[in-house]
Amino acid sequence: MKNSQRTTTRLNNKTALSAAMLGASALLIAGCGAAPEEPAGTSDASGEATEATVDYTGCIVSDAGGFDDQSFNQSSYEGLTAARDSLGIEIREAESQAETDFGPNVNSMVTSGCDMVVTVGFLLSATTAEAAEANPDTNFAIVDDNAIELDNVKPIIYDTAQAAFLAGYAAAGTTQTGTVATYGGIQIPTVTIFMDGFADGVAYYNEQKGEDVQLLGWDKEAATGTFTGDFESLANGKTNTENFINEGADIIMPVAGPVGLGTIEAVEEANADGADAKVIWVDSDGFLTVDAGNEFILTSVMKLMGEAVEEVISTDVDDNFDNTPYVGTLENGGVALAPFHDQEAAVSDELKAELEEIQAGIISGDITVDSDASPES
């Protein structure tokens, strides 16, 4: 729990903020992505609202995908609400609709008295660094970025190449056409790390089995591939997927947040016309988070962001905050391959056993998973 000295210091810091920053906050509260006028409390077992039991406010700012992106924003937000329910803290949220919302949203969280501000996504790095430097008595955590070196910023990062390696191997072992594909939203490290791992998993399958499964959409060595250029356009995701299917791919992994819903739509339509295409989701277990077409999801490359956000807030509540990066790996359960759910029958028992062996090999270090975007663990 926060001691009185820290609380007093933070209050003094808040009152010292400039009029310009306060003005930005007012604009936000009147417009997009505003924090609730009244902070949310906890809920009891009956669902009735209760008063917060800890003098602490945890806050979160999404990137442009929003909290209903069925991906990393949503998972991170669920971590905040889990902290509310388990710890009895208050929470506030600011949902960004565009990159221009980042600064006002983060500033609004600071001026509203947040003890910790969680920002979600690599694209919020510069905004987070600026706000953290200006407000040294407010703690920050940023998901999917490790570029900020400040005492009050905790990076939450993931070696998703490890779990994506398993997904690539699973795709290569499941494809009926001998061709699989992946594409990204924006070409940034938190996207390409998935694509690197996926490519290596396909290559490892080919090496072990003497096969020649083809990968469309990403050349790891050249660091070139297919990208939509955004994390919003479902139409772009659908077009990319249709092109891949036309080129023979029957398993597609979009690494593009909500854009991946366009892949789901394209696969649904292709399968209605007689194809047997499948999707590999990323960030969350898509079978559980995607509203329609989830029966075509082979598996998902998961980053357990909710658990990490809840853990980081919990340590801050206990006054044990530090800026050492949290690195999610297969070994600590921060990343994982999701169950096959409705696609269980599509994956042989032999392949499942091989995936277990490969995971053990990655954890032991016997199998090296390498990406330029992988964090040091």
Image: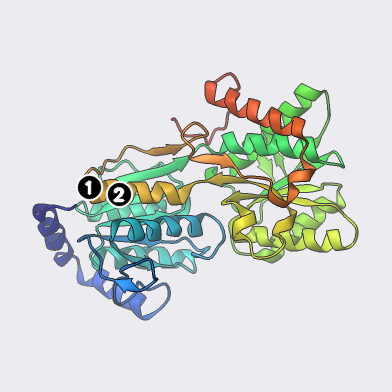
Going by the numbered disc 1, the residue's amino acid type is Asp
Q: Residue at label 2? A: 314
Task: Give percent across and percent down for residue 2.
Answer: 17, 53
Task: Give percent across and percent down for residue 329.
Answer: 49, 35
Q: Is residue 99 left or right of residue 187?
A: left
Q: Residue at label 1? A: 318
Residue extending farthest bottom: 30
Label 2 crowd (10 A; few <14 / some 14-19 / many >=20): many
Q: Is residue 244 left or right of residue 374?
A: right
Q: CA distance from mark 2 to mark 1?
A: 6 Å
Q: Quadrant of the C terminus?
A: top left
Residue located at (64% from left, 30% from top)? 356
Residue located at (86% from left, 42% from top)? 176
Residue located at (64% from left, 45% from top)? 339
Task: Give percent across and percent down for residue 102.
Answer: 41, 63
Residue located at (59% from left, 37% from top)? 163
Given residues 46 and 107, the one toward you in this image is 46
- Can residue 221 be seen here? The reply is no
Q: Is residue 126 above or below residue 101?
A: above
Q: Is residue 356 above or below residue 123?
A: above
Asked if labels 1 and 2 touch by Cβ distance under 8 angstroms, the answer is yes
